[in-house]
Image (cartoon, grey):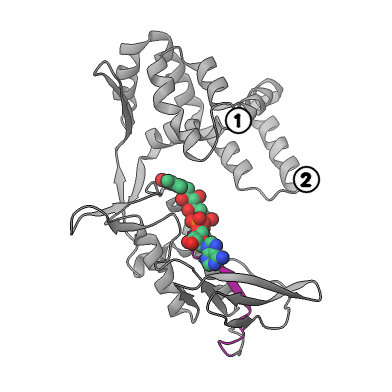
Amino acid sequence: MRHDRTDDTPDAILIGSGHNSLVCALYLLRAGWSVRVLERAQTPGGAVKTQELTEPGFRHDWAAMNLSNFRNSGFYADFGEALEARGAEFARAEKCFASVYDDGTWFGVGTDTEANLARIRALSERDADTWRALTEGFEARAGLIGGLMSSPMSWTALSGLGFKALRECGWGGSLDLLRFTLSSPRDWLGRSFESEKIRAALAPWGMHIDYAPDIASGAIFPYLEAFGDQAGGMFLGRGGSDTIIRAMVAEIEAQGGSVECGTEVTRILHEGGRARVIETADGRRTRRSSPMSPPARWHG
Ligand SMILES: Cc1cc2nc3c(=O)[nH]c(=O)nc-3n(C[C@H](O)[C@H](O)[C@H](O)COP(=O)(O)OP(=O)(O)OC[C@H]3O[C@@H](n4cnc5c(N)ncnc54)[C@H](O)[C@@H]3O)c2cc1C
């Protein structure tokens, strides 16, 4: 049941309309809170934006374009149907990514494992064997790594995962997995593949999310991207990645929330140790409603 409050005192004010804020807004609305999202840019979506940057009629994703994590998320399981009803659409790419090299050759990953292996074998027999072994272990490993990434940061949840790993992989396998999750992109790629071309094609997926080549745990992302794409393809937004943003904003508005663009938050004022008032660049102040207990129910 929605709280009967005027829109001037929303239960929650979210600063910024990146997709994480919009996700949060939708869960809060579902739990009965009233919500206002304030965005300083003229369009919502943060790094997920599609714009005509070159020629009229040609829309480009100017930052994020790979929506696989979003499409495969728990959030999408909860809200996908509602978003699709509001126009969210995806295209699944089967030829997912590739790198070209100075000598005119290329290496890329798609959903056809045998074709990937043939390309790898042309570069290194040993790397083809490694790729096959990694492919065979992917489903079990990805389940554990995915569990780690989506787990609450509590000892209970993490020790539950530790026991699951021990049950499924034994001590040796669990220690291998631990070593892998702590590896940097350079460390893991250097250990696993002898071909510089394969290393070079996979490493950017770590850097892509701000893990420089020697940052611990950065190996997870090249691994998940390469073998996840091979297993399921890559989801792009049909017509542009902003398909998800337009659908989320439409759903927020349909549920009584609002997303206000061109509004920069300049100050957050506290009362009794709680953030209560938001000041925006145009001098307006918005008060959040009285502190409430967290929503009792987050899922649908
Ligand atoms: C070039 C690039 C490519 C990427 N490609 C991918 C990809 O293909 N796939 C993928 O999964 N991830 C990708 N990412 C990462 C992904 O885009 C980000 O992790 C994601 O956008 C973060 O979302 P967010 O909601 O946390 O914040 P953001 O998207 O950063 O949004 C924050 C919003 O808050 C607003 N804001 C900030 N301060 C204020 C203020 N004071 N008042 C009002 N508004 C404010 C900003 O204007 C912005 O709109 C990419 C990132 C970059 C930079």
The residues colored magenta run 6-19
The residue pinned by badge 1 equals 215
- Name the amino acid type tagged 2: Trp
Which quadrant is home to the N terminus? bottom right
| For residue 241, above or below residue 197 | below
Query: Which numbered tag is attached to residue 133?
Result: none
The reply to whether the residue tagged 2 has its Cβ within 8 angstroms of ligand 1 is: no
Residue 87, horizontal then vertical, whole percent? 32, 66
User: For the stretch drawn in magenta, what is the main secondary structure?
Assistant: loop
Instruction: Report the residue at 43% width, 73% height from top.
Output: 251
| 34 to the left or right of 238 | right
- Who comes first in sequence, dot 2 or dot 1? 2
Q: CA distance from mark 2 to mark 1?
A: 24 Å
- Which residue is denoted by mark 2 in the rendering? 155
**Foreground: 198 or 39?**
39
The x and y percentages for residue 198 are: 40, 20
- Residue 75 appears anywhere in the view: no
Q: Residue at x 47, y 19 (%)?
A: 133
